[in-house]
Amino acid sequence: MNVNNGVGDGNTPERIPEVTLPEGWAWATVGEILVGSDAGKSFKCDPRPAAPDEWGIIKVSAMTWGEFRPDENKALLDDALVNPDYEIQAGDLLLSRANTAEHVGAPVLVGDVRPRLLLSDKSIRLKAGSAIDRDWFIYWLKSPAVRKAITAKATGTSDSMRNISQPDLRAIVLPLPPAAEQRRISNALDSRLARLGKIVRLIARARSHAATLRRQILLDLIPEPHDWPAEWQAMTVAEAGKVDLGRARHPDWHTGPRMRPYLRVANVFEDRIDTTSVMEMDFSDGLGKYRLLPGDILLNEGQSPHLVGRPAMYKGIPEGVAFTNSLLRFRAADGVLPGWALFVFRRHLHAGRFMREVRITTSLAHLSGSRLKTVEFPVPTIDEQRRLIAEAKRQLARVDVIDRLLDRAEDRASAIRRALFTEAFVGRLVSQDPDDEPAEDLLKRIRIEREAAEVERKTIRRAAAQAKRKSRTATQRRPSVIASPSAPTSHAPVPEGEQSALPLEFTQ
């Protein structure tokens, strides 16, 4: 690796990792294995997808999910702005220059693609040297270590939109195998990751079955209203307890003398309250009616439609906590156990009962306190509530065991995937062949290829500039034609079939 000019353009490469490479390998930077790269431009677009006969600009979402999605584009409003050099072609290697912390810099390979689709200002096209195995390069870019390095280099104050610059990307150091070994590595990863992918899909299928089983246990616990036992009391939520909406947030309460923790919709999951990120606001007038007590049931007031009404029980942690108006609180009346109320609401969630009461605004569904109060609420005797709660917990505990086993299997699959990438890029996944062309020779050939490409780009730019100057000069020399102000104007009729002769004056 050229430590003085690691990318061929004056960028400083990263420090070389303390790893001994196999014979024939070499350290290089991303810039040293490229012959060029392109970044698109920002254009004024219509948010709708481009029609087949229109030019489109790809969106960030076209490069986010591990595969190229050409339908994720916006229609360009002015075709005169199009530079065909930035049209996306099959086989292009693209990555997102700006994205979430998780996805910034993630690569995709373009397969079949519609014509008239352009790079955006948030996309980068990498052009590797012809001797670089494209599949090997993509695997390296997808490897956990590289993803971590790109995320660390990405700038931005918000995790929702981070940016990676081309110089920073080009300066990342990589272990470069000989070209023939690159192909052996990518083939080995293809095979092993395909087998691992089958295992991951089996885990996902088993997790889906576990979720179905959990849902069925909740649905079987409480029958439909017309099947409730005669000894059960048929109530509404308002009759079974008290419903309150949480406190609204206000900028004036972000700081103050009596800061207290509060729970919001991001903290409340089904049967679980996540306290890893609890925010605070000023309660100078005291927590009052917004103070939570152990046994209170919190339900999501605003959520995606299938999650609205998601319930969890507050069990006293953290202490002295309030709740905001993104949540509803149910406090059970006498004769209703909080644990029973939680199971009733979980049953309503999985039966889609809350969906019949929501109001949709944009992408969120809202469950108002007044609508929640009217929802049916069965109340068996206290002893029957205890018995049903115990039985449901016993059955759900078995599903929890399955989930923990699946978690372990998933963690193991992730560890195997990380190990495969680690072994691949330190030279331990496949054997070395002493007859392979050394990577140092490969870098020399790429350098020659890059220099030739740069000469060609400069020649094209000079030709374009000369053509532009000639066009401008020709426009300046072209004579303009104006009517002579001194020439008399004839109003005599023109004979049919003849043109009138206009007095003209030419000015140089």
Image (cartoon, rainbow, N blue to C red):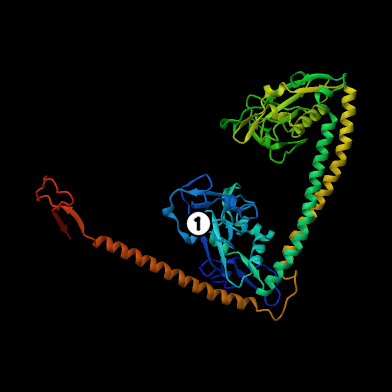
Q: Which amino acid, mark 1?
A: Gly
Q: How many marks?
A: 1
Measuring from the top left, give residue 26's x and y in whole percent.
64, 74
Measuring from the top left, give residue 256's x and y in whole percent.
60, 31
Judged left or right of residue 40, residue 215 is right
Q: Nearer the viewer, residue 369 or 333?
A: 369
- Residue 298 in the image: above or below residue 275: above
- Residue at point 50% right, 48% down? 75
Q: Secondary structure at mark 1?
A: loop
Tell me if mark 1 has few (under 14), some (14-19) or many (20+) residues whose alpha carbon lies within 10 angstroms of its own: some
Measuring from the top left, give residue 267's x and y in whole percent.
70, 37
Q: Nearer the viewer, residue 36 or 224?
A: 224
Measuring from the top left, give residue 169's x and y in whole percent.
57, 61
- Residue at point 64% right, 59% down? 149
- Residue at point 70% right, 77% down? 23
Q: Look at mark 1 in the image and give the residue it sits on.
A: 40
- Residue 435 in the image: above or below residue 247: below
Q: Quadrant of residue 291?
A: top right
